[in-house]
Amino acid sequence: MPRQFLATKPLQACKLAVVIGTLVFAGLGFFRIVPDQQLRVLLLLAVLGPALTLVVLAETLFAGYRVVRADDSPADRLTAHPAYTAVRAGEVIITLLAAGAFVVIIGTLPDEPLPGPGAIGLLFMGVVLGLVALGAILVRTLTEYYLHRRGPAVN
């Protein structure tokens, strides 16, 4: 990752590094290249997706504030780069739905402890939702990197 991208878009560069690092660690743990890390990998994938969703939500709220405060109209600003706007909206919608589904699943659990297979199934659902969120974040950060490499910045 070039230093210009890190200097220009530090949040996107950090999100890209976290997602790629997590996926590499998950792959190494899944294929047992890094021994005895399978449970840690599953827990990391289940927790990191909803955690990064908070970052995406804060970033979206800040971007929305900037769009409202800009001199040009919000419609002009959003339609200036429709593909970028679609990718950004997709990231927000997918990550919020994945995190919301995770919260709903946890909220509907019974008060008594789950038996072993139920807990493992819950963990696997969290992993799938985390992977979905990480995938959406990866698409957005790679789009940001592509636009950075291509030329003028898109806000």
Image: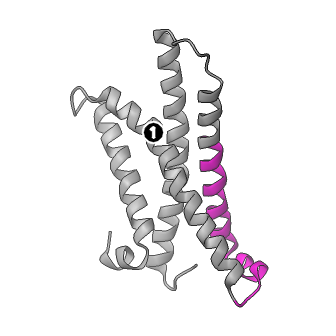
Horizontal side, residue 78 vs residue 19: left or right: right
* Quadrant for the C terminus in the image: bottom right
Q: Position of residue 65 (x, y in %)?
A: 65, 74
Residue 30 seen in this snapshot: no
Residue at the spot 51% in from the left edge and 40% down from the top edge = 130
Q: Is residue 88 magenta?
A: yes
Q: Residue furthest top?
A: 115
Query: Exactly how many numbered labels are in the figure?
Result: 1
Residue 127 seen in this snapshot: yes
Residue at the spot 55% in from the left edge and 52% down from the top edge = 136
| In this view, 119 is above or below 66 | above
Does the magenta stretch mainly form a helix, a strand or a loop? Answer: helix
Q: Nearer the viewer, residue 1 or 51?
A: 51
| In this view, 116 is above or below 107 | above
Q: Is residue 2 magenta?
A: no
Residue at the spot 32% in from the left edge and 68% down from the top edge = 1
Coloration mode? one colour
**Residue on which disc 1 sits:** 47
Other-residue count near label 1 (Cα within 10 Å), few / some / many at <14 / 14–19 / ≥20? some
Q: Position of residue 28 (x, y in %)?
A: 28, 37
Horizontal side, residue 61 vs residue 41: left or right: right
Residue at the spot 48% in from the left edge and 25% down from the top edge = 123
Look at label 1 and name its amino acid.
Val
Q: Quadrant of residue 111?
A: top right
Q: Residue furthest bottom?
A: 71
Q: Position of residue 120 (x, y in %)?
A: 47, 18
Q: Nearer the viewer, residue 154 or 103?
A: 103
| In this view, 38 is above or below 92 | above
Q: Nearer the viewer, residue 64 or 154?
A: 64
- Per the image, label 1 sits on a secondary structure element best described as helix
The span shown in magenta is: 71-98
